[in-house]
Every structure is written in structure tokens, then in C-alpha cells.
Image (spheres, coloured by chain):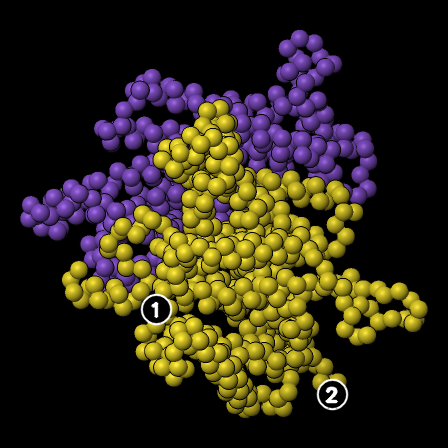
Amino acid sequence: MIFAFKPVVLWTDALIFALIAAIALFVWYTIRHEHLRAPWRKVMRSTGGMMAATVLSVYVLIGILDTLHYQRALPLEKQTAEMRFAPEVLSVLDALTEPLRLKQERTFSAPFATHAHSKETMQGADGTTRRDYPRLKFGGAHLKNPQTERAADVARGVLQGIALGALIWTLASVILTGIVAAHRKTSFAGTSGALWRGELDVPWRTVLVTLGGLLLVGCSLAVLSGRYHVFGTDKVGQDVLWLTLKSIRTGLVIGTVTTLVMLPFALVLGIMAGYLKGWVDDVIQYVYTTLHSIPSVLLIAAAVLMMQVYMDTRPEIFDSVTRRADFRLLFLCIILGVTSWTSLCRLLRGEALKLRELEYVQAAQAFGVPRWKIMARHILPNVFHIVIITTVLGFSGLVLAEAVLSYVGVGVDPAMNSFGTMINAARLELAREPVVWWPLASAFVFMFLLVLSANLFADAVRDALDPRARAQVARPSFHWRRAGRQAGSGA
Amino acid sequence: MLRYVIRRILYAIPILIGVNLLTFALFFVVNTPEDMARMQLGVKRVTPEAIENWKRDRGYDKPLMLNSAAAGLAKVTDTVFWNHSARLFLLDFGKAESDGRDIRHQIATRMGPSLAIALPVFLVGMATYITFALLMALFRATYLDLSGVVLCVAAMSISGMFYIIGGQYLVSKLWNLVPISGFAGDLSAWRFMVLPVAVGLIGGFGESSRWYRTIFLEEINRDYVRTARAKGLPEGRVLFHHVLRNALIPILTGAVVAIPTLFLGSLVTESFFGIPGLGSYTIDAINSQDFTVVRSMVFLGSLLYIVGLILTDISYTIVDPRIRFE
């Protein structure tokens, strides 16, 4: 057996699976309740929100592929020997991008370069030494004469990528139109026409256009990355595109697992403080005011430093680099959660204070419903929109925070790929002559797209779920046409 | 009023005690002084004597909270907690572990440079963001407003570190206008301050402007604004005379809480620009694992934040006559 493997579930993997299960449960519950579906239908109708959701789902897909970890089996030495596994923990994404991971140059090279970024002393065939830019081991290695052939080769790669992307896109749009047509119980052609005229409730046209753009760029990059280092290589010669792809999971984990970790505390304590009042309220308020008054970056720094001491003095617990880095990531999520649950807790307390005076809660009290049951059945569902809004709004902030914390030195493990470690490693290279700009540019583009789409999606969710925002009239969200129409009619 | 202020200050004391106990637990209980000594001296090949010496030099060899060997008051005072944590209340921070310098003196001298960057960013920032938000509110629901919001969202989606790196690269390296980093004690410091302040302004632009715009729009939908329009007041007068004044209440009182923490400076900005303020002091302490300095900064940061909260409450009562104390 060549493809034997053993699945590995790291701590953060387990939490991501738990998160996916929780989201699935939430979706299942929401679909069965009309009053819960209504705001999400509104999210589906917002152009900006759907555009952002399309981009986000690509990131999530990459993140999930990078979450399925396994260990490869070592080749068997004897038939009777028991199966042994390589110590290296890989992910499905690693397997898919294996060429990128293994094609390591010696040091910096520019995007699409065929020669290294700096001169080296080389020995000629006749024994003379000269200083020149050496050819790369992998980047453009198939070209005989790079100067003349490269432009045509890159153009050919782009064309192939576009063809591939167009093919996948056509397939995807046919499937999507088919599903929508089946849902609307209309003909395929009619649905297609309505879709492209933008007459459907859900802006599927935007989704398809966004998806098309992503597919064209993505496929071109995929085709070209087999022949070149499309985003160049870093100091130790690793492909920057691969580093960036690996950073996505870290960002997503920080943005989501943090919320997952802090949510139970914020929910239980916030609702208890607001509903029970009295000394419980005093104690909980005291705890969150105390935690909140410590500047969060300092609390994180203090906690991470302490954890570092703990890990360094007990090296036997953390046997491999991957596990060590994963534990540190989990710890970072927990400590970020500890610093960020306070604001959600305060919001929930305020809302629970309001809700406990409402008639339906008083009726439940009069019927003798136990207090915990009132909190679970009557208060919790009615504060849940706040939880969703805070979660979605907080995501982008957490992704940005990771970069800063990694720069400060209290972020993820230096061995773990993340946007923060990329920026940190690359910022000094701007001082080089000629300048090394590609690691920064790559981290910038991928991070900007992730955070921007998270922000846009969060806006759409907040607009749909926040009852107060509904009352507001002048609120041009990212619906280009509606805003224009309002302006035109002078409203 | 005075009674209210005194009560507010008394409320702050238990919170500071809580912060103190929490940092004490984090720095001395979760990891014992023994662990820290090993960390500082190197994990491998360290003799027990060396660890004992390290602990004795810093006074970490005493019992944590209760010294049963001592008599009388010394039971409490001759402990790690009393000597290292309780003293923070007197702003006696002790000496740094790495270089043995007096932390209080360091803080006093480094506050100036921190403030020199943070204060202009705060003041100019408030003015700029409020103006921009007001313009967006004036042109609300038009393409101008929409592009303003798009600009804000795009600006807040970029990590602040890119603004710093981009600013240093463009302004200092390519255009050679101001030095890349550094600071000066005299008036020529402005050359070093221009870029950090500008970067700080751009970095806060998106989030703040959008937030202020929301506040303005909420205010615009109030009844008194409709009354003012019904009276036939021109839109400009409604906006600048009625809306601006009332919207400034939440904006300004919301900003008060940040004023004391301006002393702390910004970690990332100061370290990128090499400004000898409290932010870079903290980063240096984190990198050299100087726990005493980090602990002092945690306490100082909480203290300043709580002062900010008290100032916020007081400012509410001053600007909004509807709020009563008792």
C-alpha cells in the first residue's frame, strides 16, 4: 500500500469540526423556523453580502482542506513489520499543493523569475569563476532560453488557465441555474434569462460573476504555479504562494475558534447577570469589568509569555513542531477569547435586563417555570441575534489582531505559517536593493481580500439581523443600484 | 457632584485589586519563580544554586502570600506578593529584570515621546473623522456617501502594519522626505513625528469615520430634527446647529476614555518608528521576557483605563444635564 495514512486530529482541528457541526445544527434549526429564516433571506438578497460570501467560501474551502491532517505511512521494511508512520503531519492542502511545497529554491527570487534575485559566484565549465544570477532549480526550469521564451510561455499558461477556469465556471453556472430553476419550478432557459437580467430575488448574477473572476485568476495561478514561482520565493526559497495559502487556515482559526471558545462564557454569564440580578449580577459585572480594564494586548502578552515559560520548561509534553505550534495557536485563541468575551457579555446582560421585564417572561414566571428554563427557552433565543452579529463583526478584527500580535512576538508559533509571521519576516526586506516586495504584496492581497469580504458580509448580516437598523431609513448598504435610485429620486 | 466622584473612585479600588491579584496569579502561581529562573538562565545545564541565587537577588525566594516563619506583621509583608505586587498600588514598580533600571523613572521619561505621537493623532484625528463623517451624513444616500463608506470599509480592511510599512517605504525611502525612524528630544523632533502621526491618522480613518457617520445618521432621524426641518430651516443649519451639537455628546464622551491611555502610546507604531516611548518599552520587555516590566505595564494600563472610565462618567454629567447623580 503506497497511500496508507493515519488521520491526525489536532486540537484546533477538533474545534473546527465542532464549529462546523454547530453551524450545521444552526442552519438545520433555522431552516425549520420561518421567523429565523426571514433575516437570513435578507442577507441572501444583499449584493455586497453575497459577493463577500462567495469570496469567503473560497477561503473557507482552503481552510478546511488545510484542516484535514494525516500522517503518511512509511514504506514497509519487512512484510511482517507493523505499520509505521512518518512523524511529519500533513494536510490535504499540502498533498494538493505538493509541487509548490517541495520545489524549494535556495533563496529569494522574484515572481515569474527564472534566475535568482542576487548574484552568486559560480564556476564555469572551463574552471573560470564569475559572478552572475544563477538559474533557479525549478522556476522556469523547462525553458531553454528564458529571455526570449518566457513571455510567450506565461501567456500560454494564462490562456490555459483561463480556458480551464471558463470550463469549470460554465459547469458551475449550469448546475446553479439548474438548481434555481428546479427551486422556482420554471424552465431552465427562463431561469437563466431572469438570472442574467438580475430579476431574481437572490443576486445569483453577482455570485456567478464573482465566482468567474475568482476561477479565472485561480486557475491561471494554478497552471502557472506548476512552472514558475508566481509570487516568488522567500528568504529560504519557499514558494510565497504556498506560504500564503497555508496562512489562510491560521487566520480563519483565530477568527472563528476564538469566538467558539468564548461564546459559552459570555452567553451563560451574560444571561445570568441580566436575568438573576442581585449578587450574581454584581459578581459577574466585577469579573468582566476587571478583565476589561486590562489593556488586551498587554494581557495577551503576559499570558502568552507565561505559556511560553510553561512550554519551554516542559518540552516532553509537546513532541512535534506541529503539535507545539497547534497548542500555541489554541492557547492564543483561548486568551484572545478571554479578552474579548467581556463586551459580548455586557451586551447580553443589557438585553437580558430588558427582556426579563417583558410580559411573556413574566407570564412564564407566573406559571412557575424554573429559572434556568426561562433563561434557556425564553431569554437565550431572543438574544441570539446579538451573538451572531458580534461573532461576524468580530471576525475581521481578530484576523487583523493576529498579524499585530505575531509582530509583537506574542502571536502564533514562529514555525506556523500566518499573515503575521509573513509580514514580520518580509518587512525588513524592503530595505534591500533591489527591493524584495513580493512576500509583503502577497500577504497584503490575500489578507485584504479576506478581511474586506468578512467586513462586507458582516455588514449584510448586521443590517438583516439588527432590529434597530431596520427602522433606519437612509442606510445605503452595498446595494449599488438602490442607493443610486434613492439619489435619483431625491429621497 | 463631589460625592459622586468620590464614590466612583472608591468603586475603582476593588477593580484594581482584582487586576493586581490576576497579574500576581499569572506571573507567580501559574509559573513558579523557579520556572522563570530556568527560562532566564537557560533550560538545560543550570545548577540549583544558580536558580537559588537568581531568586534571592530578585526577592523571589520568599513565600508567595503568607510567611509563616516570620512574626507579626512581617507574616504578610515579608512575601513575594507584598514586595512585588502590592507595591504597585504606590506606583512603586521596582527594577527591570534585564538591566536593573528603575521602572518608574523609565516610565516618567518615556511618557513624553509616547504622548508626542499619540496626542496629535488623537486631536487631529477627531477633527478629521468628524468632518468627514459629517460630510457623508450631509450627502447621505447619494453616490458621494456611498463611495465614502466604501472607502472607509476598504481602509479598515487593511492591517495597520501595511500603512506603516507602506508609509516608511514611500515617504522615507523613495521620496526621502523624512527619516525612516528615530526621535529627538528637542524641537527638531517634528521631522520624526510627521510620518508616525500621518500613518496613525490614516490607520484610524476608516473605522472611526464610519462609526461617527452612524451616530450622525441616528441623530438625523430624531424628532427634533424633523421639527427643525418643518420650521423651514435650511439643511445646513439643521446639520451644523442641531445635529452636530447633539451628536458630539456621544462622540466626545466616548473619546474621553481614551485620553489617559494616550500616555501608553502605540506598541506597533512606536516600535516600527523607533520612538523611545512606553509602547516600544513594552515591546522590548516582551522580547527580552522581562516580567517585572510587563507586570508594571499591565497595572499602569489598567489604572489609566479606569481613570478614563471615571473621567467619562464625569464628562457625561457635565455635558448632558439630563443625567443626575443620586
Q: Which mark is residue A125?
A: 2
Quarter occupied by the N terminus of chain B? top left
> Considering the numbered disc 1 on the image, is that residue within a helix, a strand or a loop?
loop
Spatial separation of the CA atoms under disc 2 and disc 1 = 69 Å
Above or below B40: residue B18: above
Q: Give the x, y percent position of residue A110.
A: 56, 74
Tell me the kind of residue under disc 2.
Ala
Q: Is residue A169 left or right of residue A12?
A: left
Above or below A311: residue A4: below
Q: Which mark is residue A201?
A: 1
Among the chains pictured, the one given purple colouring is B
Which residue occupies 24% across, 55% down? A474
Q: Alpha-carbon neighbours of circle 2 within 10 Å: few (<14), some, or many (≥20)?
A: few
Q: Is residue B16 left or right of residue B122?
A: right
- Give the farthest residue toward the left: B232
Q: Quadrant of residue B37?
A: top right
- Give the farthest residue toward the top: B72
Q: Give the x, y percent position of residue B167.
A: 41, 59
Q: Give the x, y percent position of residue B256.
A: 34, 36
Tell me the kind of residue under disc 1.
Asp
**Are the residues flagged by discs 2 and 1 from a single subunit?**
yes
Which of the marked residues, 2 or 1, is nearer the chain's N terminus? 2
> Considering the numbered disc 2 on the image, is that residue within a helix, a strand or a loop?
loop
Quarter occupied by the C terminus of chain B? top left
Which residue occupies 68% across, 71% down? A95
On the question of residue B280 being in view, the answer is: no
- In which chain is the residue bearing label 2? A
Q: Is residue B234 left or right of residue A265?
A: left
Among the chains pictured, the one given yellow colouring is A
